[in-house]
Structures are given as C-alpha cells and as structure tokens.
Image: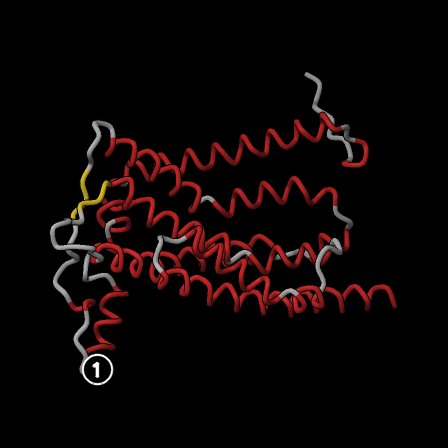
Amino acid sequence: MAKKTIKPPNEMSFLDHLEELRWHLIRSTLAIVIIGCGAFLMREFIFDTVIFGPKKMSFPTYRFFCNIATWFGFDSAFCADKLPFTIQSRTMGGQFSAHIMTSIWAGFIIGFPYVLWEVWKFISPGLHENERKNSRGFILIASFLFFLGVLFGYYVVAPLSISFLGTYQVSEEVLNEFDIGSYISAVRTSVIACGILFELPIIIFFLTKVGLITPEIMKKYRKIALVIVLILSAVITPPDVTSQIIVAVPVLILYQISIYISKMVLKREAKKEKQ
C-alpha cells in the first residue's frame, strides 16, 4: 500500500490546504465529543457541583464577600441562607437538552489546549523557522490565559450576576422562577466569554507580528478601545452594570499589558534587522 506523501506548505494547492484544515477540524471535534461524553456521564458533579454551585450561598465568592461585610460590621445579602429564586424546566426535553449542550461545552473548555494545538499544527508550517522558535510556549501561555479567564468568569462574574439578577424584583407580585436553559446560559456566557477575552495579549502579539498593530496605534485609540470593551462587556455578560464593570476592568488591564507586549515584539524585530 502506497504511503501518503506530505507536500511542503509552499507546494500545497488551495484544495490541499482545505483538506488539511478539514482533518484538523475533525480531530478537534472528535476530542470535544469524547471529552463531552465523559462529562455527560459525570452528570451529578457537572450540574450539582459546578453549574449550580453559584446558586448556593456556600459558594466561595459569597462567603468571601460575606466575611468582608461582617468584618466591617455591615449587613450583606451575601450572608443570606439562600438565593430567592428557583430553577425550572418548562419543556419536555428541557433537562435532556441542557445535559447534552452542557456536556459539549464542558468538552470544549477542557479540550481547549488540544483544539489550540490542532490550530497551531495547521498554521505553524506557514511560519519561518525563527518565527516558530519565537512562538514556543504559545499553547501553554494561551491555555493558561484561557483557563484564567474561565476561572475569573466562574468565580467572579457568574456568581455576582446570578446574585444580582436572581434577587432583582420589580414587584413582590413577580416571582423569580427561571428556566434551566436561561440559568445555564448565564453561567456559560460568563465563563466562555471571559476565557476568550483573556486571550487578548496573544491576539495582539500575532497582530503586531504581521504589522497590523503597533503600540502607537493602541495608545492613540485607547479611548475608543475603552468604549468597545464596555460594549463587549454589555454583550457577553448578563444585563447588569455590575457584571459589565467587573469584566471591563481586567480586560482594560490586559489591554495595557498588550501594549507592552506589542512594544517587546517590535524591539525584537528591530534587533533582528540590525543583526
């Protein structure tokens, strides 16, 4: 049986690149599905411990704010016995659909480093040898930033959003009884969006490498970036001002860090040109 010959990237046609991309996507999807199947079997842990964790007042975030309020001698809603809302399933397949979709998203989050590795395998052959060397640690750093964003979304944004929206009432005549899909969507959006937003330094690194971004441009449009960040925060978080500010602050810090990263990239490029 003849072996499949692998062509160099500069000799591959457009269809060859599409075929290569297809296999990377297939392997990434299979990884997400396999991990998702494992998450599907761990139903009690995924839902009772992880998903519904921010609904319980024993959640670490609530205890932290309760302890701070107690230390200052203030009364706080974070010290309550439970949040005043219930979660319901109003459709026949509501709980099963929630189980399936949550398992798939869990597969994506856990399998993110592998998905990133497949993406890197696709784009790295098109880079020069020195560019590949300078990009070592890309998967490790990008995965670290993603998981850092996921933890920030889960332990900060999600519980504060749930606490605010779960206790908000326009009238005592209206009870807060949320559908399971709405609740899970609030948690999932907070977690996934923060994970992606925390990739900003990586994105700026590559945009600087290809010459689309410079520190001067980022400084010049800092105010516009602030407005864009606030808009993105409003889109990806539940509709409350607290969550938007909580998300916007670390993103603005990452934006400032990205300016320094862009400077470092340009300095390295200038040093190489001199050599």
Does 270 sit above or below residue 85? Answer: below
Question: Is 214 left, or right, of 112 in this rendering?
Answer: right
Q: Quadrant of the N terminus?
A: top right
Which residue is rendered at x = 22% and y = 68% of the image?
63
Question: Is 274 left, or right, of 5 in this rendering?
Answer: right
Q: Quadrant of the C terminus?
A: bottom right
Q: Residue 184, image x and y in percent? A: 30, 44
Q: Residue 204, image x and y in percent? A: 64, 58
Which residue is rendered at x = 14% and y = 49% of the image?
175
Q: Nearer the viewer, residue 219 or 260?
A: 219
Which residue is rendered at x = 23% and y = 61% of the image?
59
Number of marks: 1
Describe the element under mark 1 as helix, strand or loop: helix
Question: Is 204 left, or right, of 38 in this rendering?
Answer: right
Which residue, given by chain and number where applicable, does mark 1 sit on? 71
Q: Quadrant of residue 93?
A: top left
**Residue farthest to the top?**
1
Q: Residue 101, image x and y in percent? A: 35, 36
Q: Give the residue type at disc 1.
A: Trp
Question: Is 8 left, or right, of 135 in this rendering?
Answer: right
